[in-house]
Amino acid sequence: MMARYQLILAYDGSRFAGFQRQKPSRPTMTIQDLLEQALRSLGWKGEQVLYAGRTDRGVHALGQVVAFDMEWSHPPQALQAALNALLPSDLAVQAVMEVSPSFHPRYQARGRCYRYRLYCAEVRYPMLERYAWRVFPTVDIEAMQNAAQRLVGSHDFRAFGTPLSARGSTIREVHFAQWKAWQEDGLSTAWQFEIQANAFLYHMVRRLVAAMVAIGQGRLAMEQFDLALQGDPNVIKAELAPAQGLTLMKVLYGETS
């Protein structure tokens, strides 16, 4: 019997060209490619899966949400096991559940939560290079925390990202944003930024992180940051933090906190 299934995916994005399938003229491997190949091996006949959002090349996920319709005569846990047997070690299905036929992981999402990790060191730590941004000189975390607190609420984030469509709004509501210490062996200064919002613009988190690091290093004034949050895209340089520090942690449905 046909049913709609929801998957929670986790992946190390280091070797992938992002989540979304690319155009035929760009034959690069994506998360969507591998997942759909695995599903077809199990008898899936759909054209493409539905997903909560795109992640860029090099971005990781612990809570990407995917949905698809499929005839499967076994329990959802058996589908999880079958998919994981077919997928590579850097991509795994964390959970499977049957959902309403009308469920859409993107359009029904009430919020998303991201984490960005960085560490301050003059010399790189090779084991962390795939999962964090090495920053030097050391940042003033109090200044960065001050900037993060200003993000909470509804703002026009056009200085920090672009909508998915030309007519899309650049106004987003941030539910919380904070920096906290990140404990890692051998590191005395490591931080992670956690942010949750109703939705995000393209590159919004990475541009916000880059701006806050510039504040923490004394390269950007808080007054300029405030003007950018008022929707002025010309007061700051649109720097982009590296992709490898970013992880999609969770997509929220129903309650947003």
Image (spheres, rainbow, N blue to C red):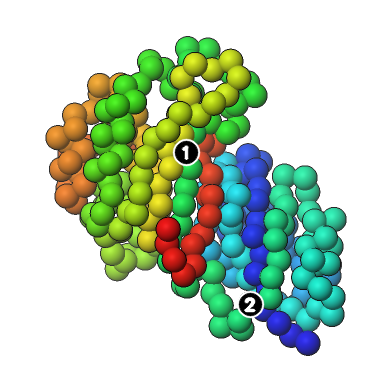
- Residue 17 visible? The answer is no
Rendered residue at 17%/36% (across/down): 224
Image height of 40 relative to 15, above or below: below
Where disc 1 sits, the SS reads strand
Is residue 226 left or right of 39 when viewed as pictured?
A: left
Q: In front: mark 2 or mark 1? A: 2
* Residue 79 placement (x, y as % from top left): 80, 67
Image height of 212 relative to 2, above or below: above
Please name whichever residue, 165 or 77, is drawn nearer the observer in this view of the structure.
77
* Residue 194 placement (x, y as % from top left): 43, 43
Rendered residue at 58%/33% (across/down): 131
Is residue 86 left or right of 182 when viewed as pictured?
A: right
Q: Three-letter amino acid code at disc 2?
A: Val
The reply to whether the C-beta atoms of the residues labelled 2 and 1 are less than 8 Å apart is: no
* Residue 195 placement (x, y as % from top left): 40, 47
Please name whichever residue, 177 or 28, is drawn nearer the observer in this view of the structure.
177
Image height of 153 relative to 131, above or below: below
Please name whichever residue, 257 or 143, is drawn nearer the observer in this view of the structure.
257
Image height of 62 relative to 1, above or below: above
Q: Which residue is mark 1?
A: 116
Is residue 93 left or right of 53 when viewed as pictured?
A: right
Q: Quadrant of the C terminus?
A: bottom left
Ranked by sequence position, the earlier of labels 2 and 1 is 2
The residues bearing labels 2 and 1 have C-alpha atoms spaced at a distance of: 30 Å
Name the mark on residue 252: none
Q: Three-letter amino acid code at disc 1?
A: Tyr
- Residue 119 visible? The answer is yes
Name the mark on residue 99: 2
> Total label count?
2
Rendered residue at 58%/15% (across/down): 186
Rate crowding at label 2 as few (under 14), some (14 to 19) or many (20 or more) other CA atoms within 10 Å.
some
